[in-house]
Image (cartoon, coloured by chain):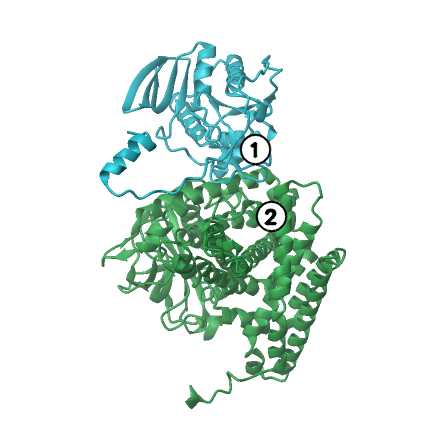
Chain colours: A cyan, B green
Amino acid sequence: MKILTTVKRVVDPDAKVRLNSDNSGLVTEGLEAKMNAFDQYGVEEAIKLKEAHGGEVIVVSIGDSAGTKEIRTALAMGGDRGVLVTADMSEIDPKGVADLLAAVIEREAPDIVLMGKLSVDSENNQVGQRVAAKLGWPQATFAFTCEVADGWATVGREVDGGTANVRVKLPAIVTADLRLNEPRYASLPGIMKAKRKPIEELTPDDLGVELEPQLIIQGYSLPPARAAGEIVDDVDSLIDRLQNTAKVL
Amino acid sequence: MSFLVNRRDLRFVLYELLDTASLCERERFAALDKATFEAVLDTAHQLAEDKFASHAHELDENEPTFDGTSVHILPAVKEALDAYVEAGFMAAPFDEELGGMQLPYTISQAAAALFHSANVSTAAYSFLTLAASNLLRAFGDERHKRLFLGPMLEGRFFGTMCLSEPQAGSSLGDIRTKAAPTGDGDYFVTGTKMWISGGEHDLSENIVHLVLAKLPDAPPGVRGISLFVVPKRRVEEDGSVGPLNDVTLAGLNHKMGYRGTVNTVLNFGDAGGCRGWLVGEPHQGLRCMFHMMNEARIGVGLGSAMLGYTGYLHSLEYARERPQGRHVDGKDPAQDQVAIIEHADVRRMLLAQKVYAEGAMALCLYCARLVDDLETSADLQERAQIELLLGVLTPIAKAWPAEYCLDANRLAIQVLGGYGYTRDYPVERFYRDNRLNPIHEGTNGIQAMDLLGRKSLRDGGKGLRALLAQMEPTMAQARKHDRLRPWAVDLAAACARIGEATFAVGAVAASGQTRQALANATAYLHLVGHTVIGWTWLRMAVLAANAPADTTTADADFYAGKLHACQFFFRRELPKTERWAALIVSLDDTPSTMPDGGW
């Protein structure tokens, strides 16, 4: 079974990110980077599938060459080889990411693609869906269970108000939610093995993808400071305020 | 922000200060590189955060209990240690043929630093096992290695060190535990051991106690101590774990800190059936133990440093977030309050913690680097020099962090004020945990006597001279920078003070008055310790001053912080050496001459 999984290098969510001086972007230099948490679930599930069904796990990332570190981590967890598409992430929108991934997936022709449901830095939650649409493949998003048998994947999905079970015919895109599994650590023997695993570097040109962002970020701003609270005299005036001032009732 | 360590600082120490990456040019480490080291530390960091730090508070509140039959420990401890073993940390520093990764000691200590910061109590079980494994690797025979070391590196057996007894702690020559030949090559061990960390638990299949005991024909004192391996359960020749080996738990000690590390009183051979196996030659047990002492003591120092470090990071975060009061020159109540990091005295307390903790971590990792050099340097003359240097640095690497990073924890509590004194914040736990470190693994008083009596006065002060010679190039480099030049001068003056103090004490010792000579050993430890830390800060300042000008803002801030912290140490800490030196040279004997009726 050929399994493809994706990893994104993100700023450590525990780090304090500041706005730059003209509010045109975020200051991330000097902050620690990590593998996107949801991608860890995707990688873990990919490795579990390989352990159960055999085959290989291909780990794909997009970004600058620093991103090989996150690919190596996934290879140390048990992935077999990596693909890094070198590109400046600050200039790519989710559509661009999906276009690049779809091109890699077409080259590799995997049986299943496992991705994080979103990246914890930009939280767009749309790349998996876009890739599926672009390829015309079935998709099962927000997975908390994933069983593969006889060319089909049965996926339990976390949805508003409960869960939903879907069956998708492979090849398909599955995006991982946080209850899917407990990702393993990159073990020390795994880290040694990962040193010898190949990572192929490609450019958007190599993949024949032309990047034309459709999403332009105009600027960033901090949430407004919270205004002071107010003590009201009785329940009636509270309801009045909620209805007429806050307009939440 | 991680509260375990500033990874930028750890990278600075490992690769800029200690050039750890160059170790990979040596045959033993040829399969490794810097990216591998960082990947190992990333796994350590994540594991330490997820599995160790996560239950540190709960474990402190729920110390192990003994119901008369077995010991109960919070289940999260076993989960953490299982994950630690699974990730390969137990065997990491050992040879590939033993299933290890041949990780340099410097990097395994850097990984250990993260676990110390996260949760010293849980980490202690693995470090004890590592120390016991190290001893068996060095002195065990083929059988010891097969039956005990192998399973320890696989994480199936855990280890302990059984030295102290209720009546004999610092004075090991007075132990009473006995070992008598069984006639079939083994020994029957009888006696009671005290303060045995990890002495009883069900975290592992078996517990391997390394026990100091006396053979029937033992000469008196420290020359008559032998080392035995005594398992909790017997191990058959085929490696299978057999019946209990008559090691019984007499009770638990209830401690101030390190509360998650079960600490036991163990009886060996109450029923006459406790078998042990001799490790090394008869009567050479203490020598075996001392062979491992450098590493054990550096480990204690690093543990102390990291408790200081995590306390610093916690109190720094608090000081940045906590609004309280206004600047003394603008007390307008209509204005917003300022964060307490704005207040001069809070800044003093944060900087003191920074210089203690970062300085101590750098020193301990430098010592770890020397251990790597001692084992792998191709130059035999260099090795002899390193052995001298490590000898003199080890008591400092143990005692200085234990003293000053404990003080760092006191300051962390002070920064948090009343909140710091509550158990809702972790800084009081750090203090309680750290309070062990001046006591165990040779009290700080004993370290002081070791430094002065053994390392500085013996052999014509060769060790001390080796240390002072190491400082020369740093001072030469520092003199090239305007800002650093006065500090080079100050460091030279502190070195001269060490010379004078050593000379004064040496003269007394030479006249046979050893007791008088060593009476102010603690002041001597502070004097040399502060000088060594001053040197460590100057080394870091030289790197910071030489950093490329086109560096990123984050790096520029980092180096500026190093320079400023160095300034703090040289202006406010190093001058303390004057008083200590004066006291030592005066040969003051006030404590010794206190009339007995006057207490």
**In front of the other: B417 or B562:** B417
- Whether B363 is drawn above or below B226: the answer is above
Q: Mark 2 points at which residue?
A: B14
**In front of the other: A124 or B9:** A124
- Whether B47 is drawn above or below B268: the answer is above
The answer to whether residue B186 is visible is no
- Whether A167 is drawn above or below B503: the answer is above
On the same chain, marks 2 and 1? The answer is: no
Amino acid type at mark 1: Asn
Amino acid type at mark 2: Leu
**In front of the other: B272 or A162:** A162
Q: Mark 1 points at which residue?
A: A23
**In front of the other: A153 or A127:** A127
Calculate the distance from the C-alpha at mark 2 to the C-alpha at mark 1: 35 Å
Q: Where is residue B344 in the image (x, y as percent from the top left)?
A: 54, 60
Q: Position of residue B247 (x, y in %)?
A: 31, 60
Chain of the residue under label 2:
B
Q: Which residue is drawn at 30% across and 54% down?
A: B62
Q: Quadrant of the C terminus of chain B?
A: bottom left
User: At numbered mark 1, what does the secondary structure look like: helix, strand or loop?
Assistant: loop
Q: Where is residue B289 in the image (x, y as percent from the top left)?
A: 49, 62
- Whether B372 is drawn above or below B492: the answer is above
Q: How crowded is mark 2: few (under 14 residues within 10 Å), some or many (20 or more)?
A: many
Q: Residues within 10 Å of mark 1 (few under 14, many from 20)?
A: some
Q: Residue at x 45, y 68 (%)?
A: B225
Residue A116: quadrant of the picture: top left
